[in-house]
Amino acid sequence: LVSPPPYAPLPRDSRRYVPVLQDRTGERAALLRASRTAWEGMTPLIEVVPRDQVPSRDALVRRVRVLKETVGEHPIYLDVKNVDPCAMTPTRSGEREMLEVLFEAARRRKLRFMPVARTNGSSRHRQIVADAVAADGHGLALRHRIASTLSLPGRGFEILIEECLGGLG
């Protein structure tokens, strides 16, 4: 077997396209049809949308397997949607936080992923992301909802970014 090329961080190019996609059938089909040229100019942010509020480990492993079949060796940003990333997920050895279980499954499948930190995320969420960055060394995405800045008088965008990055170690 040939090893994949070494991981390279994103190019510092203002034209980099980051589509935000859910791990749904149609959106995965679009990625499967994407040309090599399209992949060279994009890194998708894929949101895993579990069917249950507290998905099982096996359900997350299946989602990651399908994602790996979809993206192959291409790097992606990996996040969850509509669930608490720190919700406790049943595993064979007890309960663990869902995001940890998802990232572990992604590592086992050799999915080239970068975790997503949110400026409005909990300190535990940021710690899970920081642990993934330290373990994998692939970098991360920082996600910020503009509306959350507008609702915090006296705390501008720069302060939120500094606080979030400071929490990532």
Image: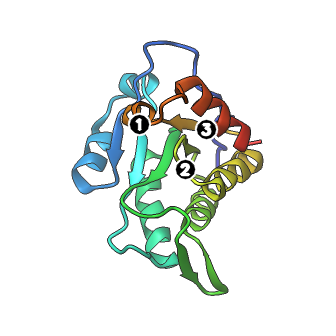
Q: Give the residue at x 44% y 69%.
A: 62
Label 1's element? loop
Point out the residue furthest to the top here. Answer: 14
Q: How many marks?
A: 3
Q: Which residue is mark 1?
A: 151
The type of residue carrying mark 1 is: Ser
Q: Earlier in the sequence, mark 2 or mark 3?
A: 2
Q: Residue 141 or 167: which is nearer the viewer?
A: 167
Q: Residue 76 or 134: which is nearer the viewer?
A: 134
Q: Quadrant of residue 82?
A: bottom left
User: Is 65 drawn above or below residue 78 in the view shown?
Assistant: below
Q: CA distance from mark 3 to mark 1?
A: 25 Å
Q: CA distance from mark 2 to mark 3?
A: 14 Å
Q: Earlier in the sequence, mark 2 or mark 1?
A: 2
Point out the residue furthest to the front here. Answer: 153
Q: Quadrant of residue 158?
A: top right
Q: Give the residue at x 70% y 45%.
A: 133
The type of residue carrying mark 2 is: Gly
Q: Is residue 134 left or right of residue 165?
A: right
Please provide percent x and percent y for residue 169: 77, 42
Q: Residue 31 or 2: which is nearer the viewer?
A: 31
Q: Is residue 76 visible?
A: yes
Please provide percent x and percent y for residue 124: 65, 58
Q: Give the residue at x 72% y 47%.
A: 136
Please provide percent x and percent y for residue 161: 60, 31
Q: Is residue 139 visible?
A: no
Q: Give the residue at x 45% y 20%.
A: 16
Label 2's element? loop
Please provide percent x and percent y for residue 103: 60, 59
Q: Which residue is mark 3?
A: 140
Q: Earlier in the sequence, mark 3 or mark 1?
A: 3
Q: Which residue is mark 2?
A: 121
